[in-house]
Image (cartoon, rainbow, N blue to C red):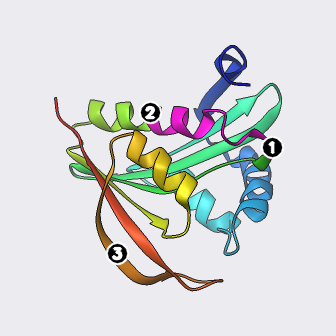
Amino acid sequence: MVGKALSQVRVEDMRPEDVTDVLSLEHISFTTPWSETLFMNEIFKPGSTPKVAWLHDKVVGYICVNQVLDEGHILNVTVHPDYRQQGIASLLICLMLRHLKDNACKAVYLEVRASNEAARKMYECAGFTVTGTRKNYYTSPAEDGVVMVLPITD
C-alpha cells in the first residue's frame, strides 16, 4: 500500500457512528482496550481531536490527541494489523502535529510501551525524543511507559 494506495487513505474527524469500528480495532490491538465511553468522551471533549483513517469503506486506523494550553498529548494511535508498516500511523501523526502547531502548541508528549520498538522507532523518525520513564505505567502485562516529547518550533 505504500505510495499510491496511501494517497487513497482519507482522514476524518471521528464521529459517534465510527466508534463501533474503532472499538473492534482497539480490541485486536491492545490488551487493555479503551471503552466506548472513553472514545465518546474524546469525540465531545473540548481540546480533543480524534481522527479516523479510512481506506475505501474500512476504518484502518485512528488517533486521539488532546491539547491543553500550549501542550499536546497523543493519547492513543493504532492501525489495523493488516495495514501496519505502510505509513498510515505516520500520516495520522503528521496531520496531528500540523494541527497542533496551527493551534499554537509548543510541545507534544506521549507514552509508549518500553517493548514497542516499532512504535518507538516511528516516533523517533517523527522527531520525538525520550524524556523519561513511567514505572509500571501499563498493565496486562505490567510494563514501563517511555515518555517521549517533540518540541514544536515555528
Crowd rating for badge 3 (residues with CA inside 10 Å; few <14, some 14–19, many 20+): some
**Label placed on residue 25:** none
Q: Residue placed farthest to the left in the image? A: 154
Residue 28 lies left or right of residue 139; in this view the side is: right
What residue type is disc 1 on? Asp
Within 10 Å of disc 2 (Cα), the crowding (few <14, some 14-19, many 20+) is few
State how far apart marks 2 and 3 are (Cα).
24 Å
Q: Check residue 64 for magenta coloring.
A: no
> Residue 58 appears in which quarter of the rendering?
top right
Question: Picture coordinates of residue 82 (x, y %)?
Answer: 80, 43
Instruction: Give the residue at mark 1.
Output: 82
Badges 3 and 1: C-beta atoms under 8 Å apart? Answer: no
From this view, report whether residue 50 is shown above or below residue 95.
Answer: below
- Which residue appears at 69% of the width and 13% of the height? 4
Which quarter of the image is occupied by the C terminus? top left
Residue at numbered disc 2: 94
Quarter of the image for the N terminus: give it.
top right
Q: CA distance from mark 2 to mark 1?
A: 21 Å
In magenta, the rendered stretch is: 82-94
Q: What amino acid does circle 3 point to?
A: Thr
The tag earlier along the polypeptide, 2 or 3, is 2
Question: Is residue 120 left or right of 11 when viewed as pictured?
Answer: left
Q: Secondary structure at mark 2?
A: helix
Q: Which residue is mark 3?
A: 133
Q: Main secondary structure of the magenta part?
A: helix
**Is 83 within the magenta?**
yes
Q: Amino acid at mark 2?
A: Cys
Question: Quick one: 31 or 116, which is closer to the camera?
Answer: 116
